Image (cartoon, grey):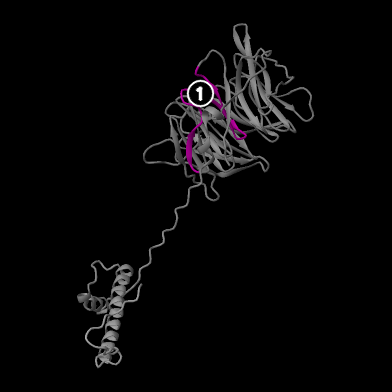
C-alpha cells in the first residue's frame, strides 16, 4: 500500500503523537476489556455447541438460558452421563447342512450295463465298500427270471457278472460283505434254498437251509445271517446261522401272529425283531416292543425296548431304531428313536406319514411317499427330497451312504438309479 501524506494548512506546527495524548491510557484499558469479552463469548458459544453434540440436548442452548439449562442438568438427581453407542454382537452365520447343496437332477446317477449284456430287469440292489450288487434278469418262457448277480463299480463304470449258477429261477435278496455272499435261490412258485459263498476261500455255494413257503429277507452281519421263515400253517420262526460253522438256531417263534411277517434286522452283532407288548393303554391301542439279542454272547436281553406304537420291520444302525406302524400301507407312519443309553423306554419321533417303504443307513433313513424318495438326516433333524421333480420312483434300498431306487416314470424298461448322500 502507498504511503499517505497529510497536507498542512495554516502554519508549520506538527500534530502530537497518540502515546503522548491524555486519552491513551483509557483507550488501551478499553481495548483489553473488549478483547477479553470477545474471548469469553467465543468460549461460551463453543461450550454450547459441544454440549449439544455430546449430551444431545434437544433444544439449542441460547446465551440467556445457558446458565439455567446447565443448572438443571447438574441439579437434584440428574447426572451428566455420556452414553456410548450400544455394541451389537454380530449374528453368526448358520453353517449350511451338506444336503443344502444337493441337486437331484445333477447328483442322481443311472446304472448303465454294456450293450452286449442281455439283462433288462434289475432288483434287490445293495452297496458295500463303494460297490453295488444287484440281481439282473431277462424274459424266459414268458416270465422274467432274475438269473444273474451283477457287481457294478460306480467310479470306473465296470460291470462284472458273478460266476454263480442258479438251481431254480431267481436270485433273491442278495447281500455281501468282505467275506461272505448270501442269497435265496428262489423258485417261481415260492420257497427255495438259502445259500452262502465264502468270497475269500472261493468254491461252490453252500446250501444253508431249504425254504418251502415264502421268500424270506436275509440279513447279513459279519459271519451271521438272520431271517424269519414260515414253517407251518400258523407258525413262523426267527433263525440265525453262523456261517463259519453252518450251525442254525431258532431264536424266537410266532404262532398266529402278524409279527411273523415282520423282518428282523442284524447290525454290529445285535439282532432285533418286533414282538407283542403286554403294556395296557387306556386308549386301547396295539403296541409292540423291540426285542434284542447280542449274537456274540448269545444272551437275550429281557428288558425289551417299549415304544408306545405298533412296530413293523424294525431296523437299527447301532445308534437309532427305525420302524413303521403298519404293514407297508399308505397309512403307515415312519418313526425313529435313539437307542437308549439307559432304561428301556424309547422316545419315538414321527418322521412322515404315508410311508410305503424305508431303509436305515448310518447317517439317515430313506423313505418313499407317493413315488417320491426322501431322506431324513439324523444330523440336523430335517428331511430332503432326493429324487427330481416329475420323476416317479420306487425305493429299493439304502446302504454304504447311498440310496437306490427304480425310476418308474416310464415302465418301458428298468431304470436303476442311485445317489450318494452328502454328510460333510
Q: Is residue 257 visible?
A: no
Residue 7 vertical position relative to residue 229 in the rendered view, above or below: below
Q: Is residue 206 left or right of residue 190?
A: right
Q: Dot 1 lies on which element? A: strand
Q: Tell which of 414 and 147 is nearer to you.
A: 414
Name the residue furthest front. 11
Position of the C terminus by quadrant = top right
Q: Is residue 370 magenta?
A: no
- Whole-percent x, y for residue 99 in the image: 52, 38
Find out whether residue 384 is within the magenta segment: yes
Q: Is residue 84 left or right of residue 165?
A: left
Tell me what residue is drawn at x 63 percent, y 15 percent.
137
* Number of numbered labels in the structure image: 1
Task: Decide if residue 31 is on the left or right side of residue 235.
Answer: left
Q: Which residue is mark 1?
A: 393
The relative height of residue 382 versus residue 332 in the rendered view (above or below) is below
Residue 20 in percent (x, y) is at: 29, 92
In the foreground, 327 or 253: 327
In the picture, residue 59 is in which quadrant?
Answer: bottom left
Q: In which quadrant of the rendered view does residue 156 lie? A: top right
In the rendered view, would you say 53 is above or below 273?
below
Q: Which residues are magenta?
A: 380-409
Mark 1: few/some/many CA within 10 Å (<14, 14-19, 20+): many
Image position, residue 78 (x, y; %): 27, 76
Closest to the observer, 158 or 44: 44
**Left or right of 17 on screen, residue 353:** right
The answer to which of 82 and 304 lies nearer the viewer is 82
Amino acid at each position: 500500500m502507498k504511503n499517505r501524506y497529510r497536507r498542512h494548512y495554516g502554519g508549520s506546527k506538527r500534530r502530537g503523537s497518540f502515546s503522548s495524548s491524555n486519552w491513551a491510557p483509557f483507550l488501551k484499558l478499553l481495548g483489553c476489556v473488549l478483547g477479553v469479552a470477545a474471548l469469553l463469548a467465543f468460549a461460551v458459544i463453543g461450550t454450547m455447541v459441544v454440549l449439544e453434540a455430546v449430551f444431545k440436548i434437544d433444544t439449542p442452548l441460547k446465551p440467556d438460558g445457558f446458565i439455567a439449562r446447565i443448572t438443571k442438568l447438574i441439579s437434584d438427581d440428574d447426572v451428566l452421563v455420556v452414553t456410548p453407542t450400544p455394541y451389537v454382537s454380530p449374528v453368526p452365520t448358520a453353517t449350511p447342512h451338506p444336503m443344502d447343496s444337493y441337486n437331484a437332477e445333477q447328483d442322481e446317477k443311472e446304472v448303465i450295463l454294456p450293450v452286449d449284456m442281455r439283462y433288462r430287469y434289475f432288483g434287490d440292489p445293495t452297496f458295500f465298500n463303494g460297490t453295488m450288487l444287484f440281481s439282473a434278469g431277462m424274459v424266459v418262457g414268458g416270465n422274467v427270471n432274475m438269473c444273474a448277480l451283477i457287481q457294478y463299480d460306480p467310479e470306473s463304470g465296470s460291470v462284472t457278472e458273478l460266476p454263480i449258477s442258479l438251481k431254480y429261477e431267481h436270485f433273491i435278496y442278495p447281500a455281501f460283505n468282505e467275506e461272505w455272499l448270501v442269497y435265496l435261490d428262489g423258485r417261481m412258485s415260492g420257497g427255495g434254498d438259502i445259500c452262502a459263498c465264502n468270497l475269500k476261500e472261493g468254491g461252490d455255494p453252500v446250501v444253508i437251509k431249504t425254504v418251502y413257503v415264502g421268500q424270506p429277507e436275509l440279513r447279513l452281519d459279519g459271519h451271521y445271517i438272520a431271517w424269519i421263515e414260515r414253517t407251518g400253517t400258523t407258525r413262523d420262526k426267527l433263525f440265525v446261522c453262523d456261517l463259519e460253522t453252518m450251525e442254525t438256531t431258532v431264536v424266537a417263534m410266532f404262532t398266529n401272529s402278524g409279527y411273523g411277517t415282520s423282518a428282523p434286522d442284524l447290525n454290529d452283532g445285535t439282532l432285533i425283531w418286533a414282538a407283542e407288548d403286554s403294556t395296557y393303554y387306556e386308549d386301547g391301542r396295539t403296541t409292540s416292543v423291540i426285542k434284542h439279542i447280542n449274537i456274540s454272547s448269545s444272551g437275550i436281553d429281557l428288558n425289551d425296548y417299549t415304544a408306545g406304537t405298533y412296530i413293523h420291520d424294525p431296523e437299527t444302525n447301532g445308534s437309532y431304531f427305525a420302524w413303521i406302524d403298519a404293514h407297508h400301507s399308505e397309512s403307515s407312519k415312519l418313526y425313529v428313536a435313539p437307542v437308549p443309553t439307559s432304561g428301556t423306554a424309547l422316545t419315538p419321533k414321527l418322521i412322515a406319514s404315508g410311508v410305503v417303504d424305508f431303509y436305515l443307513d448310518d447317517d439317515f433313513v430313506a423313505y418313499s411317499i407317493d413315488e417320491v424318495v426322501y431322506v431324513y438326516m439324523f444330523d440336523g433333524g430335517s428331511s430332503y427330497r432326493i429324487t427330481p421333480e416329475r420323476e416317479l420312483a420306487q425305493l429299493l434300498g439304502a446302504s454304504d451312504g447311498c440310496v437306490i431306487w427304480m425310476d418308474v416314470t416310464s415302465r418301458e424298461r428298468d431304470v436303476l438309479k442311485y445317489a450318494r448322500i452328502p454328510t460333510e
